[in-house]
């Protein structure tokens, strides 16, 4: 399913016409039509706005490999309501264990894929500094440090879970991930070598 198909379906699921969505995004109806027919692409700011208005993630919209199912559940959370206990690393771990208490939970390490320009900039910056590593990778890891990612196995279903400071988002996987390293949208994920335990 393409971004155009997902955008059209998400808009209909939200009960919005093209005109109504255009008003909420402060763009023209023609822009929505172009995006939904694949004749144009929304920029990153519009993708973020679409994500908020239609209650879907940017990863869902961009992932054309069909790794994720269309089922996305996003729930507001208050991190202050959760306590880090036992061997949990932080409150975000506590959120996942509270949501999925009897499931197999695997923490994930995430790294945003570098764009061509980030790689070039990273190499240039590396020439002028003593950094022994790609600075573009450091930028990408820092930019996503506030989110925590998990794979949850619940019976026969595998769920990709994102926890931010404000919400927990659960996406049913269209196919099971068995590899230790995999890609979804603009991110590369790796299963952590450790397992959280309560």
Image (cartoon, rainbow, N blue to C red):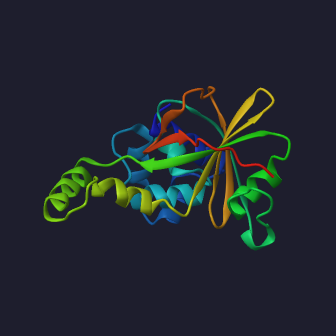
Q: Which of the pair 190/69 is nearer the observer?
A: 190
Q: Could you tell me residue 171's position as x and y percent?
A: 66, 42
Front in this rendered view, residue 169 or 120: 120
| One can see residue 94 in this view | yes
In this rendering, position of residue 123 left or right of residue 42:
left
Q: In the image, is residue 13 above or below residue 125?
A: above
- Answer with the quarter of the image where residue 158 lies: top right
User: Which residue reaches farthest right?
Assistant: 102
Of residues 48 and 103, the one nearer the viewer is: 103
Q: Position of residue 52 (x, y in %)?
A: 57, 60
Image position of 43 (left or right of 152) = left
Q: Which residue corresponds to the image point at 58% horizontal and 45% vertical from the top-left?
A: 108
Q: Look at the picture and state if 157 lies above or below 7.
A: above
Tell me what residue is drawn at x 77 percent, y 49 percent.
197
Q: Residue at x 19, y 58 (%)?
A: 126
Answer above or below: position of 52 versus 110.
Answer: below
Image spot of residue 123 (x, y percent): 18, 53
Q: Nearer the viewer, residue 128 or 17?
A: 128
- Can residue 7 be seen in this snapshot? no
Rendered image quadrant of residue 35: top left
Residue drawn 63% across and 26% down?
Answer: 176
Q: How many marks?
A: 0
């Amino acid at each position: 399913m393409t971004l155009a198909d997902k955008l059209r379906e998400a808009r209909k699921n939200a009960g919005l016409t093209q005109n109504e969505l255009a008003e909420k995004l402060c763009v023209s109806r023609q822009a929505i039509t172009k995006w939904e027919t694949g004749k144009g692409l929304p920029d990153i700011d519009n993708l973020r706005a679409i994500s908020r208005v239609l209650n879907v993630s940017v990863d869902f919209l961009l992932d054309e490999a069909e790794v994720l199912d269309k089922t996305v559940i996003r729930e507001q959370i208050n991190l202050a309501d959760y306590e880090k206990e036992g061997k949990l690393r932080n409150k975000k771990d506590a959120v996942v264990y509270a949501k999925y208490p009897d499931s197999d939970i695997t923490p994930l390490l995430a790294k945003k894929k570098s764009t061509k320009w980030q790689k070039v900039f990273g190499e240039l910056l590396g020439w002028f500094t003593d950094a022994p590593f790609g600075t573009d990778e450091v930028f990408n890891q820092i930019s996503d440090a506030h989110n925590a990612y998990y794979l949850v196995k619940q019976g026969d279903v595998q769920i990709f879970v994102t926890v931010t400071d404000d919400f927990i988002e659960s996406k049913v996987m269209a196919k099971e991930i068995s590899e230790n390293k995999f890609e979804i949208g603009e991110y590369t994920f790796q299963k952590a070598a450790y397992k959280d335990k309560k």
